[in-house]
Image: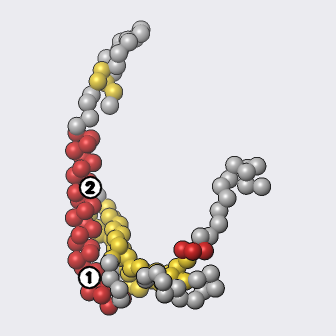
Amino acid sequence: MANESNLPDISFDVANLYQEELFTDRTAGAIRRLTPVTPDGLRDTTRPVLFSGQTQLMTPGGVLPLGFEMEVETLAEAIAQFPNAVRLALEQAIEEAREMRREQQSRIVVPEVGGGMGGGGRIQL
């Protein structure tokens, strides 16, 4: 029936199931722990537990959300690494913004060719 309406077939990848838990101090941010599980909900010990962090920083342009992976094995390690992980994610976001700005500035401005009636002097990016 999905093919009739051009909608994709969606199904869970039962070999890649995780139980998600969120830990927060309600100020600095949040740490997400993804624990691998089997289709019957039991802990899958053949795959590692994954941790990621998220926070928001106020900037002159508004709120900047930051999300980042954390290569740790325990919640205690994630808490200890959180400040440094935020710093690294912010540095990466700043560098990506600088790169985008450089790309925008390096675009060539070319006047419209072929004219037609009504003056062709429009500049296109």
Residue 80, quarter of picture: bottom left
Instruction: Please say whether residue 87 is visible from this viewpoint.
Output: yes
Residue 107 coordinates in the image, percent (x, y): 26, 35
Neighbour tally class for label 1: few under 14, some 14-19, many 20 plus, Cα within 10 Å: some
Query: Judging from the image, what secondary structure is the residue with disc 1 in?
Result: helix
Residue 77 coordinates in the image, percent (x, y): 30, 87
Which residue is under mark 1?
81
The mark total stands at 2
Residue 113 coordinates in the image, percent (x, y): 35, 15
Asked if 3 appears above or below 79 in the picture, the reply is above
Asked if 119 appears above or below 51 in the picture, the reply is above
Query: Judging from the image, what secondary structure is the residue with disc 2 in?
Result: helix
- Which amino acid type is marked by label 1? Gln
Residue 63, quarter of picture: bottom left
Q: Residue lying at the far front in this picture: please name it.
A: 46
Q: Residue at x 27, y 68 (%)?
A: 89
Q: Could you tell which of marks 1 and 2 lies nearer the N-terminus?
A: 1
Tag of residue 7: none
Which residue is under mark 2?
96
